[in-house]
Image: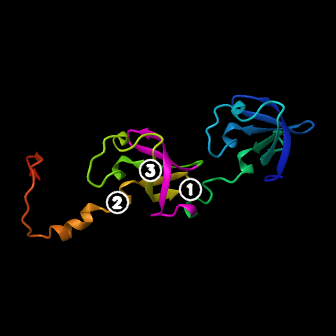
């Protein structure tokens, strides 16, 4: 039945999965997408070898088509299953920078759970054009959870939220009517930025 654990022998590997003999004359397929919660498996030979004995879970059975779908990753807990409980909104997390893109940095907060710090969430006062201006791959950074969508396996993180927002103090520091001096940074048709 669906959901039961079975043990079988790996009889062959293809680009898309591994065929497992669960009993004589009955083979099932573990598709590459069902091999790991945390890794993108490009070929099943990265995880399994012909002749290996493996425990897996029955995902689906099509008696008419004589197809048995099996899952290997279901033997372990999905790291995203309760991620929203472990990482609620506004929680502080530490993680390793695993990759940088033009739009942000991906942070591994635990194996299989990554979050994105968008460039707009890196500084209160600076316009960050590329995350490499702030961090490098393998750096360990602290961030704040802004949003988590466990169904789509997405976590939004903020780096600037680990520091006080300087704009919050401006009203106290410069109430309306305060005279101030500053450097002219930019002149436009509609005004002057100081």
Residue 87 appears at what percent x and percent y?
53, 61
100 relative position to 186: left or right: right
Per the rendered image, the range of residues in magenta is 86-110
Residue 109 appears at what percent x and percent y?
53, 52
Q: Is residue 19 above or below residue 37?
A: above
Q: Do the residues under discs 1 and 2 have CB atoms within 8 angstroms?
A: no
Q: Do the residues under discs 2 and 3 have CB atoms within 8 angstroms?
A: no
Which label number is shown at residue 69? none
Residue 163 appears at what percent x and percent y?
34, 60
138 relative position to 168: left or right: right
Specify few, some or many for label 1: CA neighbours under 10 Å numbering under 14, 14-19, or 20 or more: some
Specify few, some or many for label 3: CA neighbours under 10 Å numbering under 14, 14-19, or 20 or more: some
Residue 9 appears at what percent x and percent y?
85, 36
Cα separation, mark 2 vs mark 3, equals 13 Å
Q: Which residue is mark 1?
A: 150
Q: Which residue is mark 2?
A: 163
Question: Upstream in the sequence, badge 1 or badge 3?
Answer: 3
Main secondary structure type of the part rendered in magenta: strand
Residue at the spot 20% in from the left edge and 65% down from the top edge: 170
25 relative position to 165: left or right: right
Residue at the spot 33% in from the left edge and 41% down from the top edge: 133
* Residue at disc 3, secondary structure: strand
Question: Upstream in the sequence, badge 1 or badge 2?
Answer: 1
Question: Upstream in the sequence, badge 2 or badge 3?
Answer: 3
Residue at the spot 72% in from the left edge and 50% down from the top edge: 74
Q: Which residue is mark 3?
A: 141
Cα separation, mark 1 vs mark 2, equals 26 Å
């Amino acid at each position: 039945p669906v959901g039961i654990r079975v043990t079988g022998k790996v009889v062959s590997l293809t680009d898309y999965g591994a065929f497992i003999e669960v009993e004589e004359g009955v083979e099932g397929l573990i598709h590459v997408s069902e091999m790991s919660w945390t890794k993108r498996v490009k070929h099943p030979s990265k995880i399994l070898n012909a002749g290996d004995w493996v425990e897996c879970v029955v995902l689906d059975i099509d008696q008419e088509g004589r197809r048995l779908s099996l899952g290997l990753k279901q033997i372990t807990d999905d790291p995203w299953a309760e991620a929203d409980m472990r990482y609620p909104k506004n929680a502080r997390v530490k993680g390793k920078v695993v990759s940088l893109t033009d739009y942000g940095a991906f942070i591994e907060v635990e194996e299989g759970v990554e979050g994105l710090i968008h460039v707009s969430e890196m500084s209160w006062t600076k316009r960050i054009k590329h995350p490499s201006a702030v961090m490098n791959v393998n750096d360990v950074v602290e961030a704040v959870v802004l949003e988590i969508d466990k169904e789509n396996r997405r976590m939004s993180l903020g780096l600037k939220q680990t520091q006080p927002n300087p704009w919050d103090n401006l009203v106290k520091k410069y109430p309306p009517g305060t005279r101030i001096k500053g450097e002219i940074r930019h002149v436009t048709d509609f005004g002057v930025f100081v």
